[in-house]
Image (tube, rainbow, N blue to C red):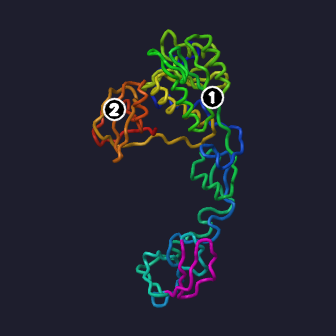
Amino acid sequence: MSNSANAIAYTFAEARERVLAQVLLGKPALERVWLSEAVGRVLGEAIRADRDMPPLPRSLRDGFVVHAQSRDGAWDVAGEIKAGQMPMRALAPGEAFAIMTGAIVPDSAAAVIMKEHVTREGSVVRADRAFQSREWISEAASMAQSGAVLAEVGALIDASLVALLATVGQSQVTVAQKPIVRILSTGDEVLDIARQPNPTQVRNSNAWALAAEVQRFGGAAEILPIAPDEEKATRELIAYGLGADLLLISGGVSAGDYDFVEVALAHLGAEFYFDRVKIQPGQPTVFGRAKDTFFFGLPGNPLSTWVTFRIFALAALERLSGRTVPSQQFSFAPAKEPIAHKPGLTRFLPGQRHADGSVSLLPWQGSGDIPALARANVILVLDAERESWAAGDWLEVMTK
């Protein structure tokens, strides 16, 4: 195959690095959206504080704000400050005000003493422990000064960033336009999901699963007609797919007589960066570029398709969307029971995280087992260079 990766089988880490080396951080076009539509989008502008945060000192606890000088270790309660109110005046020596969380701290305040740490007799309060100067007081501008950058371009907008945008009064926000991702399933055995398959056929679940993941991670998904096992039709659909920002092809990348994807791509002048990876499932994964568009040829079995999207194509999608910090997909958890596999391949297998935080391998029937993938709440990542894990050993897991 011309311009191929010379049939080199890369490790998982090597293949992922090749994706990141080729797909540089994009600078997508920008648009304005309402705050209600901003979750999952990528910031296209830096967000700055529109005033000091907080603008005045405020209490971090319910309790009593006290003057530094007491009357033999006690203070006279001279008033109350609720959240949203300005103090009636400064504290005088020997005085305290009852104060609520978030309320403005008056001048002359030494500290806020938590309600749990005072005893009160009528209008007199005493502290049951020593306190530090300005304890439980958030000083003016201690969170941010007016004009300070609070969120950088390229950040993913989640609920906490929505709260930040609302705090600085932005009902609209500038975001990166979503990359257009076209999705092509291949194979005579694949049918539209509305049709009734015979025993030799399958419905086009891969395209819908990929579209869901693309939308989840900030792309705009377009599902193309299914490509039959015919080279010309496959080439024409791939050529159309290459008009998007990213093309995902499901199936047709193995070595069978009717797997035409790589041949069609080669005819379209594709440059291949890899076409085999030392993983299971998903060994015959293809990554390359044609007509200035990156593409992934993902194996057709559903678990293979999903895994290879998450570990390779997602990295490219996030780069194209302008996202500066990638998704944190991997963590570690203890094995609930012994696990073993044959070294040589990094394996991504359906697993279950239990209430105690431990994980175990789910029974599964190979990479076509969609019910096992649906039951899984994590994917176990079994190291290519390790043979077994005892119960309690830490192993890598991928979020689902």
Residue at 65% over, 29% down: 245
**Highlighted magenta segment, given as a residue range:** 75-100
Amino acid type shown at disc 2: Arg
Residue 143: where, in percent of width, then height?
A: 59, 63
Residue at 61% over, 23% down: 224
- Name the residue nearer the viewer: 297 or 200: 200
Eye-nearest disc, 2 or 1:
1
Residue at 39% over, 26% down: 345
Residue at 64% over, 23% down: 241
Which label belongs to residue 321? none
Determine whether the residue tagged by mark 1 lies in a helix, strand or loop.
strand
Number of other residues with Cα within 10 Å of mark 2, as a class: few under 14, some 14 to 19, many 20 or more:
some
Q: Is residue 14 visible?
A: no
Number of other residues with Cα within 10 Å of mark 1, as a class: few under 14, some 14 to 19, many 20 or more:
some
Horizontal side, residue 311 vs residue 146: left or right: left
Q: Earlier in the sequence, mark 2 or mark 1?
A: 1
Establish if 52 lies above or below 308: below
Q: Which residue is mark 2?
A: 386
Establish if 50 lies above or below 304: below
Q: Which residue is mark 1?
A: 222
Examine the structure image and report whether residue 94 is included in the region drawn in magenta.
yes
**Toward which corner of the image does residue 383 lie, by quadrant?**
top left
Amino acid type shown at disc 1: Glu
**Toward which corner of the image does residue 186 lie, by quadrant?**
top right
Q: Is residue 223 visible?
A: yes
Q: Quadrant of the N terminus?
A: top right
Examine the structure image and report whether residue 166 is included in the region drawn in magenta.
no
